[in-house]
Image (cartoon, rainbow, N blue to C red):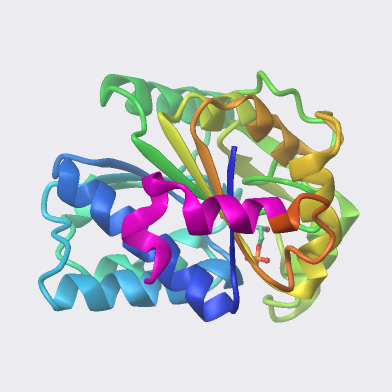
Amino acid sequence: MDVIICKTSADAEKLTARMIADAINAKPEFKLGLATGATMENVYAELSRLNQAGEVDFSQVRSWNLDEYAGLAPEHDQSYRYYMNKHLFNNVNIDIRNTHLPDGLAEDEEAEAARYDESIDEAGGIDLWLVGIGKSGHVGFNDPGTSFASRTHVAYLNNTTYEQNKIYFNPPESMPRRAYTAGVGTVLDAKKVLQLITGERKAAIAAAAIEGPMTAMISSSALQLHPDTVIILDEAAAADLKLKDFYKEVFENDPKWAKYQNA
Ligand code: F6R
C-alpha cells in the first residue's frame, strides 16, 4: 500500500483528481470505478474543471459505481445516479450510456447484482476504483461482517451507516435501509484502488483500516491484500497513523512520486 498524506483536504482532493486524470490520459478507453459521498464532491468538481480545460478526455471512459440505494428511482435526489449526474457526468464529456450503477428499482435483486458483476467482467475489469471509507470502515456499503470474497449484493445497512447517511434524507427516516453494493471481492478485483480519506472524523477508522489487522469487521482493511492500492489522506484523517512520518518521507523522496511531489 502506498500512503500519501497531504496538508489539506483540498490538496488531497486535487491530487486524487490529478492521478485519475493521468490514468485516463494514459489509457483513454479507461474503465473507472467510482464512489459517492461528501468526500468525493470536490474530486468530481476538479475532474470536471480538468475536463473543461481540455486536460482530460472522458469520451471513451466507461464507469461503474460502487453502490445504489435499493428502492430509489434514479430521479430521486438522494439516489447515487442523481449524485453522479450532478457532480460529474453532466459536467464532463462522458457518454451517459457508458455510466453504470445498479438499478435501485430492479424487481429481481439477485439477478440485478449478478448482471452488474457480469457487466464489469465483460468490459475486462475495472482499471482503477476510486473509493472512500465510512465511519464503520465500509467501502461501498460493505458494513462490518461482510466477507472479503463478497460480490455485488444487496446489503442491510447497519446503524452507523444509517446514522451517517440519513441526515441527507428528508425526512431522515425515509432513507432506505438496504442498498446494492459492489462486494469487497469486486473491489479487490480492480487493477488499482485509489482511496481518499479526509477529515478528523475519519482518523480513528483510517488508522484501524490501514495499520490494524485485516478483518471482515473493517471492510476497508481488505485493501491491505491488494497489490496496487494508493491511499491519499489529509493531515486530519492521518492523525492516528503510526507510520505517518515514514509515509511522508517516502512521498517526498521516492522518485516514483516525483511528478506529484510539488503538485
Ligand atoms: C459511497 C461509498 C461509501 C462512502 C463512505 C464515506 O459510494 O462508497 O463507502 O465512501 O460512506 O462517505 P462520506 O464521503 O460522505 O464520508
Residue 124 in the magenta stretch? The answer is no
Report the quarter where the C terminus lies: bottom left
Instruction: Relative to 178, say whether 196 is above or below.
Output: below
Q: Quadrant of residue 110 in the image?
A: top right
Report whether 125 appears left or right of 144: left
Q: Quadrant of residue 1 in the image?
A: top right
Report whether 93 appears left or right of 205: left
**x, y percent for residue 170:** 70, 81
Look at the image and tell me whether residue 176 can be seen: yes
Question: Residue at 75% across / 77% down in the picture?
Answer: 167
**x, y percent for residue 207:** 81, 51
The quadrant where ligand 1 appears is bottom right
**x, y percent for residue 45:** 37, 77
Q: Main secondary structure of the magenta part?
A: helix
Q: Nearer the viewer, residue 188 or 37?
A: 188
Question: Residue at 26% across / 58% down in the picture?
Answer: 21
Q: Nearer the viewer, residue 227 or 127?
A: 227
Q: Nearer the viewer, residue 94 or 239?
A: 239
Residue 259 in the magenta stretch? The answer is yes
Start and end of the magenta stretch? 246-263
**x, y percent for residue 155:** 71, 38
| Residue sitting farthest toward the front | 253
Question: Residue at 67% across / 31% down in the picture?
Answer: 224
Report whether 122 appears left or right of 164: left
Look at the image and tell me whether residue 73 can be seen: no
Question: Residue at 34% across / 35% down in the picture?
Answer: 127
Instruction: Relative to 220, say whether 110 is above or below.
Output: above
Count of numbered circles on the image: 0
